[in-house]
Amino acid sequence: MKKVVLAGGTGFIGEYLKARFTELDYEVQIISRQKQHISWEDQAAMVEALEGSDLLINLAGKSVNCRYNETNKREIMNSRIRTTTLLGKAVQACSTPPKTWMNSSTATIYRHAEDKPMTEEAGEIGSGFSVDVAVKWEEAFFSFNLPDTRQIALRIAIVLGKGGGVMTPYQNLVRFGLGGSQGKGSQKFSWIHIEDLYRIILFLNDNKELKGIFNCSAPYPVSNKELMGELRKTMNVPLGLPSPKWILEIGSRVIRTETELVLKSRWVIPERLEREGFVFKFQTMDQTLQSILK
């Protein structure tokens, strides 16, 4: 039986991957802070789980949907660096290490871009806390020399799917009449359907020559204005009030999050995946929303 290890595999993405890999008759092992799973503190159990596995996928890290105070910033950074480092040491301790290790990264690593799309080769790394997290996360991952384990960093855009992720707050905004543009509305929104993220993982796992960095983002990003318009259309809500930046600043304090999550322009293109022959099932925002909401 093939074996996949999901590190940090109890969240929205992890639960989806667990279900899909189970359908393929994989043995699924999960490393998590939750007591019923393999503990991050138990290196022997982690090594045992990784021993002879086909694939390790690391999704671990504190949610960025919070206020960026010093405590949260430290936890966001440390939760990613520490878990990646623990996994690297566990892989090194294996006699038969995982064939492939895919580590989460984020499309937020690129700068705010409204002028041109960001690709793996020509994309420009941004600045600020979120970018620092992404850069140090990838540095920790690629710092390990693992001759028997292929390493792939997944620069994942905002993941859309049923029953989790960002869909619920966006639906609530539209439902309560606040589904207009946020800020200027011109900022780009790069996303990926959760099913395509799973299919990318299978594609990269099957194509043994591929390694390094891949943008995991649908090929046709939309502006924030287009996103909210598609949401209103799919949900049959004719009107939505816009939210200027100053209102978002007040609201973000109330719900304890950061306006960067909606105001940063993420214009990310999956150039390497498409060049290697990957075909997205959900290429456009309208078919993605139809799939999730209808």
Image (cartoon, rainbow, N blue to C red):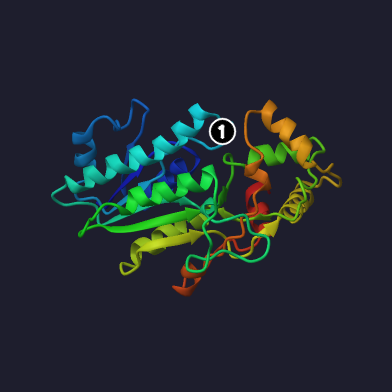
Query: Residue 70 vs residue 8: left or right?
Result: right
Q: Would you call the spot at circle 1 few (<14 residues within 10 Å), some (14-19), or many (20 or more)?
A: some
Front-lying residue, 39 or 72: 72
Front-lying residue, 24 or 72: 72
Query: Residue 32 vs residue 191: left or right?
Result: left
Q: Is residue 83 above or below residue 218?
A: above
Name the element at disc 1. Answer: loop
Query: Residue 251 vs residue 117: left or right?
Result: right
Q: Position of residue 203 (x, y in %)?
A: 40, 64
Q: Position of residue 237 (x, y in %)?
A: 82, 45
Q: Position of residue 124 (x, y in %)?
A: 53, 61
The residue identified by callout 1 is 68
Q: Residue at x 20, y 41 (%)?
A: 47
Residue 86 visible in this rendered orientation of the protein: yes
Q: Residue at x 64, y 60 (%)?
A: 221
Q: Dividing the picture into quarters, in which one does residue 258 lie?
A: top right
Total residue callouts: 1
Q: Residue at x 57, y 32 (%)?
A: 66
Query: Residue 244 vs residue 86: left or right?
Result: right
Q: Position of residue 182 (x, y in %)?
A: 75, 45
Q: Residue at x 41, y 61 (%)?
A: 213
Q: Dividing the picture into quarters, in which one does residue 31 lie?
A: top left
Front-lying residue, 128 or 251: 128
Q: Is residue 90 above or below residue 34?
A: below
Residue 9 visible in this rendered orientation of the protein: no
What's the residue type where badge 1 is placed?
Answer: Tyr
Extreme residue toward the right, this view: 239
Extreme residue toward the left, this view: 95
